[in-house]
Amino acid sequence: MTEKTVQKVHFVTLGCEKNLVDSEVMMGIVKGKEYQIVDSPEQADVVVVNTCGFIDNAKAESVETILTMAQLKETAHVKSVLVAGCMAQRYQDELMTEIPEIDGIVGTQDLIRIDELIEESQTGNRPRYFSAENPIYLYDESTPRVHTTGGSSAYIKIAEGCNHSCTFCIIPKMRGKFRSRPIESIVSEAEQLVAQGVKEIVLIAQDSTDYGIDIYKQRRLADLLGALDAVEGLQWIRLHYAYPGFFTDDVIDAMARFGKVAKYIDMPLQHSENHILKAMQRPGHQAGVKKLVQKIRDRVPNVALRTSFIVGFPGETDEDFDNLCSFVRELAFDHVGVFTYSPEEGTPSAEFGQQVPDEVKERRSNILMEVCREVAAERQARHVGRVLDVLVEKYDEEDETIRVGRTQYDAKDIDGLVFVANSDASVGDMIQVRITHAYDFDLSGEAV
């Protein structure tokens, strides 16, 4: 084998967990070609920036990161800066024209050619790897992948793309139509991850409730949960991004019946008011959402609900916003993400009238986040006195006698933590903890 001119590669991942899985796949491919993956860009010969292109702030962060990495050509050993991900898929011509420091670019459908891109970028050709329209790429259990999220938890992308036409979202244009992986493929990947020490898998897709609609001609998320529940050694199965319009009774029953399925649902609602939901082209309506939430809580006791809302969507009035705050208080969500509306180029809502001023969006965002904090604190208090299973993820930085972990009611990196006293548990252990105190987002307690 001839000696490579490039030996060390560093990946920068921006955006969502789906992008993180893409980076892990690219790392697996690169590692299989005998490159060395390094933790610091200053150590690297090549830096790959996996970009996000969802909203303006994400695009600005992507451009800033590309330029920062390009500066390392002058101050470190970096020979090439390559760009991948959603922003690359959407703006390949603009990026290559306006940022000459970019040495190559690859779209979301061609990321498995990252090794070819690295090699060709060394020739000075500034290669571009993009497939034609109608994307079909979808990784599977045989695709090389480097697990980067720590020993205890890992993401599995159960589908790619999206069939919905939300008026604020550009994802279908960047990722293509919804396409599911077979149940057998997902189970096989889960088994591989468990063999590596993973105890929790997080199922992700643009809309996980659509799972199976393409390859099985029916939604089969409940069947997938049942199949994963049978994986030996797996402790938690966490469900992200479940749209309310298709959260069917069989999925609720599966969550109640299968012991490994975390009593936790990430269900992005985006708003409470029907005329806003209609303008967004979101599935469902307020009355249906309230009925669904009550049904879930009735059948899955102590379930934790995470959601997200967009404030400042075109046409949102002060009354609409006040109603949204009341809706959040009434439904008492455990975790909420609040986003200000961003008029994205190429989306229908960017052309809508009644655009809300930026300062109004920011004010509403701050108000809603405070409402969510108050509600979350009230929800956390229900755990005091209970004994909960906690997955230990690290030692406290200031006191190594304290273990830090999560319950099934909190997702990694985005929700709360549990601080545990009187435990000699190791990272990756599942321990029982009696909760003694509740805070706005976190809990503390003592090992039983």
Image (spheres, rainbow, N blue to C red):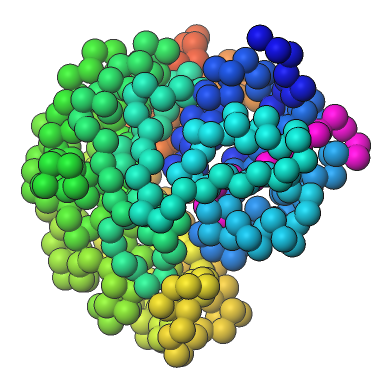
> Is 426 located above or below residue 96 in the figure?
above
Q: Residue at x 73, y 54 (%)?
A: 64
The answer to which image quadrant residue 41 occupies is top right
Provide residue 389's location: percent of width, then percent of height: 33, 24
Q: In percent of the image, x 71 and y 45: which residue is there?
A: 126
The answer to whether residue 97 is left or right of residue 246 is: right
In the image, residue 97 sits, relative to residue 65, either above or below, namely: below
**In magenta segment, residue 300:** no
At 56% from the left and 84% from the top, the residue drawn is 357
Is any part of residue 372 visible from this angle? no
Q: Quadrant of residue 118?
A: top right
Residue at position x 35%, y 45% from top? 136
Q: Is residue 69 above or below residue 369?
A: above
Q: Nearer the viewer, residue 220 or 77?
A: 77
> Which image quarter: residue 443?
top left
Q: Which residues are magenta?
A: 74-87
Q: Nearer the viewer, residue 366 or 170?
A: 170
On the image, the x and y values in percent for residue 423 come to 48, 13
* Viewer-closest of 119 and 346: 119
